[in-house]
Image (cartoon, helix red, strand yellow):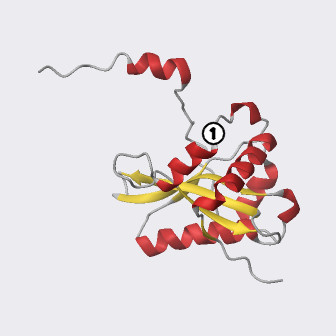
Amino acid sequence: MDRPVPRPAEPADVPEILRLVRELADYERSLPEVVATRELVHDLLFGTNTPSGVPAAHCHVIDADSPGRLAGMALWFLNASTWLGRHGIYLEDLYVSPQHRGRGYGRALMATLAAICVERGYGRLEWWVLDWNTPAIGFYRTLGSVPMDQWTVQRISGAALADLAATQPQQST
């Protein structure tokens, strides 16, 4: 078996990336929450509609045996640590389709992100994992990950996000 080699995603990969996102959301029992379109994913990864023209996120993929099909992906973006005074990588999604698991693809994707951290001087590689996803948690432990048990994830979205935004103080002119 050849060692899997992740590569940076290309615009032509967007339909397959969206397929993998939907597979992951289905596995996580959240498929109805996926509202992303090909256009939105393209803009997210390739920066066509950002003010700076710089992508907001990045993605590495592993090709499947079939041309034009992807076996897995790691979608990520930069975060920052004031404590370290450096950037890090936040892994938004790591996913390998079930028929491609057990081939080292997930480890190869994670190793690629770790190498980017080391090469660029980033201080951390972080992500969330659902507490019921014991296969993923077990896999992450084999990589040397440690849980951040003292931290609780918080989120504002939807109407609450709009309501909070409406209270933004206005600068005087």
Q: Quadrant of the C terminus?
A: top left
The foreground one among 132 and 156 is: 156
Can you name the residue that lies furthest to the bottom here?
A: 2
Q: Position of residue 39 (x, y in %)?
A: 58, 44
Instruction: Where is residue 65? Give x, y as percent.
Output: 82, 72
Relative to residue 46, is residue 156 depicted above or below? above
Query: In the rendered image, is residue 30 in sight?
Result: no
Instruction: Look at the image and tell me in which quarter the N terminus lies.
Output: bottom right
Assign a secondary structure to mark 1. loop
Q: Is residue 149 above or below residue 61?
A: above
Q: Residue at x 40, y 53 (%)?
A: 80
Amino acid tagged 1: Ala
Which percent across, then down, holds residue 115? 54, 73
Q: Is residue 64 left or right of residue 88?
A: right
Side (left or right) of 156 relative to 52: right
Q: Which residue occupies the foreground of this view, 143 or 40?
A: 40
The local crowd at label 1, few if under 14, some if 14 to 19, many if 20 or more residues have their Cα within 10 Å, is few
* Residue topped by disc 1: 36
Q: Is residue 103 left or right of residue 53?
A: right
Q: Residue furthest right?
A: 99
Residue 99 visible from this viewpoint: yes
Left or right: 16 with respect to 115?
A: right
- Residue drawn at the location 74% of the way across and 50% of the way down: 19
- Give the farthest residue toward the left: 173
Q: Residue at the location (55% across, 40% down)?
A: 151
Residue 109 placement: quadrant: bottom right
Q: Is residue 70 above or below residue 36?
A: below
> Which residue is located at x 42 percent, y 71 percent?
120
Image coordinates for residue 137, horizontal then vertical, percent: 74, 53
